[in-house]
Amino acid sequence: MPRAQKAVRRQRNGRDYDDRFRGILDVAAEVFYIRGFPQGTLTEIADRVGLTQPALYHYVKSKDELLALIVNQVATDLSAAADQALTEGDTGAEKLQALIHRVTASIVANRKTFTVYWQELKSLPDEIRIAIRADERQFVNQILGVVEEAQQEGALPADQPAWVLTEAILGMVCWVYQWYSPDGPMSEDQIAFAFIRLLGLAPARS
C-alpha cells in the first residue's frame, strides 16, 4: 500500500527500532481503543511503553501522526495478509479460502488497532485519509479479482455481481473485530473455516 505509507512513514533505523516502534503503535491503539482518540494522551502511551514523553518524540512527532501511523499499519497488515494468501492457492477457490484465513487472523490479532482504524479514520487530515481510502480500494480490488476467478470456476454463483459477493465476504470477515473474544469458544482458524463453509468453498472437516 505505497501511497499511504509514503504519506505517513518515517525513516527507521533497524530491527530493534522497528520492534519498539510497532510496540508503541500497539500500545497507542489500546489507549485510543479504551479512551478514544481525543482523551488518549501521549503521556499515558509513553508511560505504558516505558519511555519518557521526550523519548517518545524520537518515534513520533505528535498524537495526530501516531494515529496516522496506526491507521497505516492496519492497511499494511491487511495488504500483507492478502499478498501472502494469493501465493497459497492455484485456483480462485483456494486463493479465496487462504484470503479468508489470512485476513481473519490479521483482524483478530490486531482487533484493537482495527477498531481504532474504523472509529478514528475521520480524525485524520484529508491527504492521509484520501490515501488510505485509495489503498482500501486497491485491497478490495484484489479480493474482487479472486471472487471473479472463483465464479468462473463455478465455486461461487456466477449469476450474481462479483462486487456484491466481494462486499459480502469482506463485511463478514471484517466484522470479526466487533465480536471476537480470545476467551470465546472458537479460534480464528475455526471462525475462518466457518466462513469458508458458509460460502460452500470446502467440505466439512471429519
Image (cartoon, helix red, strand yellow):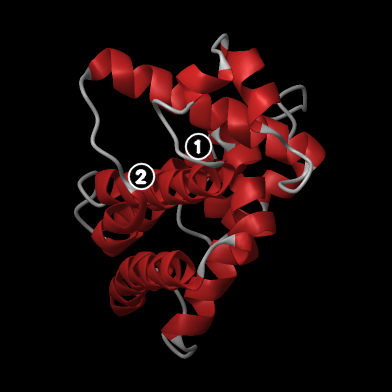
Residue with the most extreme top position:
50
Q: Position of residue 68 (x, y in %)?
A: 49, 51
Location of the C terminus (image quadrant): top right
Query: Where does label 1 land, which residue?
Result: 105
SS category of the residue bearing label 1: helix
Location of the N terminus (image quadrant): bottom left
Q: Position of residue 135 (x, y in %)?
A: 36, 66
Q: Is residue 5 above or below residue 15?
A: below
Q: Residues within 10 Å of mark 2 (few under 14, many from 20)?
A: many
Q: Residues within 10 Å of mark 1 (few under 14, many from 20)?
A: many
> Residue 175, can we see it?
yes
> Residue 187, can we see it?
no
What amino acid does circle 1 point to? Ala
- Residue at 72% from the left image edge and 39% from the top image edge: 33
**Gap between marks 2 and 1 measured at Cα:** 9 Å
Sequence-wise first label, 2 or 1: 2
Q: Is residue 185 left or right of residue 58?
A: right
Q: Which mark is residue 152?
A: none
SS category of the residue bearing label 2: helix
In the image shown, does 73 or 104 lie closer to the viewer?
Answer: 73
- Residue at 49% from the left image edge and 72% from the top image edge: 126
What amino acid does circle 2 point to? Ala
Q: Position of residue 12 (x, y in %)?
A: 24, 30
Q: Pointers 2 and 1 in contact (CB under 8 A)?
A: yes
In the image shown, does 71 or 173 lie closer to the viewer?
Answer: 71
Query: Where does label 2 land, which residue?
Result: 81
